[in-house]
Image (spheres, rainbow, N blue to C red):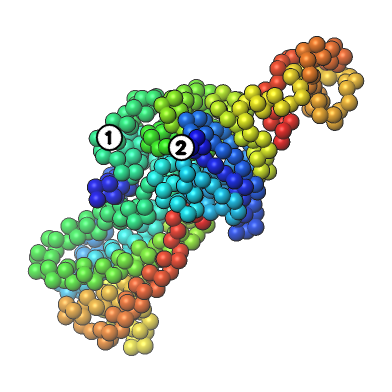
């Protein structure tokens, strides 16, 4: 048990170096959250702030997989560290867990920043439900990120692919805003995305209004996880290609 | 079992139909440095990638320390370490972090990893810059970090794919000394290079590879003994050459000429026949063996 743990720690140690050397990324994360909070409060008052808690947690967890994990794996492939790790006693599960732990720094910082907000609004239940609903999003996003990064020939372009996916699937569909503002038929399309589906479930469970039967986003999330697992298991390879 | 690595008719054809290796057969003994020597594109890297379980051979069989590289790939991986040809060290990592972190990924305790990191950073003369992020280091220093990461693992078989390419002479010597230290302490190394001098200086066994095939293998002395010549004359500013170009003993390089001879007397006689400035008359070496045997 101790040796696999050391391997995971080794990966986390190596992967965390860039974050420690470039803390500006974390500062940017915190300041963006503060900026969005002010923006939503200005336009939506206290209710707007409730929305941002849901959106920030789900959006942050989505970005963790699609953006950070995928870019890190792409970076390792580009630098040939990936080859060094394949030709070593480390297993892909240790590698992925190590990287995952490191990438959690970003959502954890986001959560810590949100604590004063949750305290003022007494919105602990919103944080908890969003976190629970964010877990399938996180799982899906890691699989999507890995599928993309393992399939592309030249991972040097990885951020050009994952950044727009990470950003657009949070900002465009109803993650920051309620789905009921959309016309009925469009809601089905907008909620086919894992981020908006999870946000919709969270909003319904919290009592921020329902725009569609809860079974629809629940089915969407389940389908994403199943397809993600199937595709990821076929795409992700660890050597012997 | 004396053989650390056995490659038997290994071949790799990529998905686009291009071959990476056609027929690679050789053995590498334990506690020795075996050098895969050949030009760029000969198939050295593909061979290393197959033996380190990164690529699956299209044909043939590979065995590392008694384990089949395809069927027992996990057993192989537990016992090897690889320094890839194009390895680039993360610009955010310092030498200390790179070596220590890499050892941790292999299951080492922090204490052991730090002890071994210190040893190899000192050996490769990186200790004084151990805490400097590699973005501030030279290309040679970064390459030495990669070598230190691999040598520090103490893996039973180390694969180093062109570890000294792009290094200055001084850095090359530091790496060569470190490699010989590993072997002297019981390690086994399989190294690739296109540098004849490097192969001649550090290799215990040389495997010549050309166009994806092994053309000859043996010690430097064995390979040289397979050429029917013992001396060579190198001449420049050639004004007249009575020798017939195209014979295997004459290499015509426009205004320069290399002529092989069986004895020293023959070499001296050739030198007197050519109207040119004689650069040198010397014994043949690995480079000549390579030209002759491939």
Q: Residue at x 60, y 54 (%)?
A: B59
The chain letter for the residue carrying disc 1 is B
Decide if residue B284 is on the left or right side of residue A222. right
**If you read the primary sequence from the N terminus, does the residue marked by circle 1 or circle 2 appear first?**
1
Q: Quadrant of residue B117?
A: top left
- Cα distance in 3D space between marks 1 and 2: 19 Å
Q: Secondary structure at mark 2?
A: strand
Query: Residue B273's spot in the image, x, y percent?
Result: 87, 14
Q: Secondary structure at mark 1?
A: helix
Q: Is residue A219 above or below residue A35?
A: below
Q: Which residue corresponds to mark 1?
A: B112
Decide if residue B20 is on the left or right side of residue A167. right
Decide if residue A142 is on the left or right side of residue B1. left
Number of on-image labels: 2
The chain letter for the residue carrying disc 2 is B
Query: Residue A235's spot in the image, x, y percent?
Result: 46, 64
Q: Nearer the viewer, residue A219 or A42?
A: A219
Q: Identify the disc placed on residue B158.
A: 2
Query: Residue B18's spot in the image, x, y percent?
Result: 65, 54
Q: Residue at x 30, y 47 (%)?
A: A7
Q: Quadrant of residue A55?
A: bottom left
Decide if residue B214 is on the left or right side of residue A108. right
């Amino acid at each position: 048990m101790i040796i696999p743990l050391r391997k995971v720690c080794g990966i986390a140690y190596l992967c965390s170096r860039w974050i420690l050397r470039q803390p500006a990324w974390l500062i940017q994360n915190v300041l963006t959250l503060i900026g969005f909070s002010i923006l939503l409060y200005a336009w939506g008052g206290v209710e707007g702030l409730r929305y941002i808690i849901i959106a920030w947690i789900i959006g942050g967890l989505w970005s963790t997989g699609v953006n950070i994990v995928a870019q890190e794996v792409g970076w390792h492939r580009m630098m040939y560290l990936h080859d060094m790790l394949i030709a070593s006693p480390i297993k892909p599960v240790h590698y992925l867990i190590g990287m995952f732990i490191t990438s959690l720094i970003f959502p954890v910082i986001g959560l810590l920043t949100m604590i004063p907000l949750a305290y003022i609004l007494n919105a602990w239940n919103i944080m908890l439900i969003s976190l629970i609903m964010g877990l399938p999003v996180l799982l899906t996003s890691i699989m999507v990120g890995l599928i993309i990064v393992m399939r592309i020939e030249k991972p040097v372009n990885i951020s050009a692919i994952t950044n727009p996916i990470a950003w657009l699937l949070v900002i465009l569909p109803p993650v920051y805003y309620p789905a009921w503002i959309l016309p009925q038929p469009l809601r089905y399309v907008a909620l086919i995305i894992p981020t908006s589906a999870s946000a919709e479930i969270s909003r319904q469970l919290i009592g921020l209004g329902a725009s569609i039967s809860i079974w629809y986003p629940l089915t969407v999330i389940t389908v994403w996880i199943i397809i993600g697992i199937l595709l990821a298991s076929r795409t992700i390879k660890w050597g012997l290609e | 079992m004396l053989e650390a690595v056995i490659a038997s008719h290994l071949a790799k054809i990529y998905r686009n139909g291009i071959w990476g290796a056609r027929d690679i057969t050789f053995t590498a003994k334990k506690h020795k440095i075996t050098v895969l020597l050949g030009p760029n594109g000969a198939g050295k890297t593909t061979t290393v990638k197959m033996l380190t379980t990164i690529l699956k051979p299209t044909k043939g069989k590979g065995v590392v320390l008694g384990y089949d590289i395809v069927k027992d790939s996990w057993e192989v991986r537990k016992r090897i370490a690889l320094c890839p040809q194009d390895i680039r060290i993360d610009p955010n990592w310092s030498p200390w972090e790179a070596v220590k972190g890499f050892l941790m990924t292999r299951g080492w305790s922090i204490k052991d990893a730090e002890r071994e990191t210190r040893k190899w950073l000192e050996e490769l003369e990186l200790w004084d810059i151990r805490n400097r992020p590699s973005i501030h280091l030279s290309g040679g220093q970064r390459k030495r970090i990669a070598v230190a990461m691999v040598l520090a693992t103490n893996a039973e078989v180390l694969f180093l794919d062109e570890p000294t390419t792009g290094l200055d002479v001084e850095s090359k010597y530091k790496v060569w000394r470190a490699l010989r230290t590993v072997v002297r302490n019981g390690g086994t190394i399989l190294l690739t290079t296109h540098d004849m001098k490097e192969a001649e200086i550090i290799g215990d066994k040389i495997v010549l590879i050309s166009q994806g095939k092994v053309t000859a293998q043996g010690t430097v002395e064995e390979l040289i003994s397979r050429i029917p010549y013992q001396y060579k004359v190198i001449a420049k500013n050639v004004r007249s050459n009575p020798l017939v170009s195209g014979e295997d003993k004459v290499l015509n390089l426009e205004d320069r000429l290399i002529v092989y001879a069986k004895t020293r007397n023959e070499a001296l006689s050739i030198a007197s026949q050519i109207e040119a400035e004689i650069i040198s008359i010397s014994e043949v070496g690995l480079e000549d063996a390579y030209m002759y045997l491939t």
